[in-house]
Image: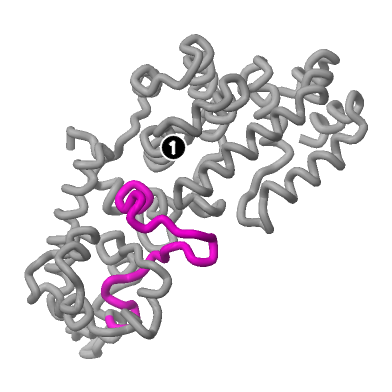
Amino acid sequence: SDLMFTLLSTEWEDADIVFEEFLDKINDNERFQFSRDFLIKLSTTLLGYNAKYDVDKLRDDKVRKEISENWPDIAEALLFVKDEIVSKTYIRSHKALTSYNALIPLVYLQYHFPGQLAKSKILHEYFVPALFAGVFSGQPDSIIDKMVKSIRENEGFNLKKVKSMIESSNKYLYVSENHLLYSCGYGSGNIHLLFNMWYGRDYKSSGFQHEPQIDHIFARSILKEQKILNEATGREVQRFGAWEINQLANCMLLPAHQNGAGDKGDKSVDKWLAEQSEDFLELHCIPRMKTLWKVENYERFIDKRQQLIIQRCEELGLLSSEE
């Protein structure tokens, strides 16, 4: 990394200052974690030198010169894509942006075919599902190169062909039920991505500080109070472990004002849900059987809500049809 940047600086003596100022701007008070390595990888890919992060590329005077001369346009394209993501999805920090490599094809599209990204549904039909399914996990360079080639040959982003190409690499834009139910949970990056697709524009917010919040349906404090008898020791122990409390089927997305002490707070679920509309229950995949809203029936509630979540994700086209 240091060698590559040193090589770049031999052609572009202000590279260090320019990159640091740009990173301060795009990382937005450390909400994101863009790096110098990513900027170099992005630049060589956009300029036609493939995605592999290879020091030999920057030994070439021509490559270094092209990066320095084209940097303003590269930076503008990356900033545009980042702003599109922030404004049109709930990916507003590095916690939800699980792969920076997934951005490269989008920046390539904006750089070479400006205007197409803003007018398309690519972010919701490709980008978010690709992140959630881990398309760019492992060794992503071949995927990036194939996508860049597809965009170049089609003079734009052909979703059907991109999906076919991804599948030819044994990757998919959907996941299994187990991945859905057990890889997502409170605090995970994927849960933000899932809720992005699930809730769509229903909860679009006006600013970072006021975005919807991931919340437990059954409050942690209430579930931690539930005890069972350990027959081996004769003592009462906590009935539910951390994963059982934080699992996807106990999470929902709520506006900040609705998640506060003046609204939901730590109310019992049965009392709080009784105040909600049918549309609210439908949006959040809440089982209609009111007996399931009582904490003593928590496990039955989870089982039923898992079924409803699976149905919702099938409707979204997120799940594999083969289980």
For this orientation, the residue located farthest to the bottom is 235
Residue 195 forms part of the magenta stretch: yes
Q: Which residue is mark 1?
A: 123
Displayed quadrant of residue 20 = top right
Tell me if I can see residue 152 in this picture: yes
Check the picture and name the quadrant holding the N terminus: top right
> Does 70 appear above or below 14?
above
Q: Is residue 246 left or right of residue 4?
A: left
Residue at coordinates 53% horizontally, 24% vertically from top-left?
A: 144
Q: Is residue 34 left or right of residue 132?
A: right
Residue found at x 82% / y 21%: 64
* Depth check, front residue: 268 or 73: 73
Question: 52 or 229: nearer the eye?
Answer: 52
Q: Residues within 10 Å of mark 1 (few under 14, many from 20)?
A: some
Q: Which residues are magenta?
A: 194-222
Residue under the point 48% across and 18% down: 156
Residue at 84% of width from left, 27% of height from top?
A: 8
Magenta stretch containing residue 75, yes or no?
A: no
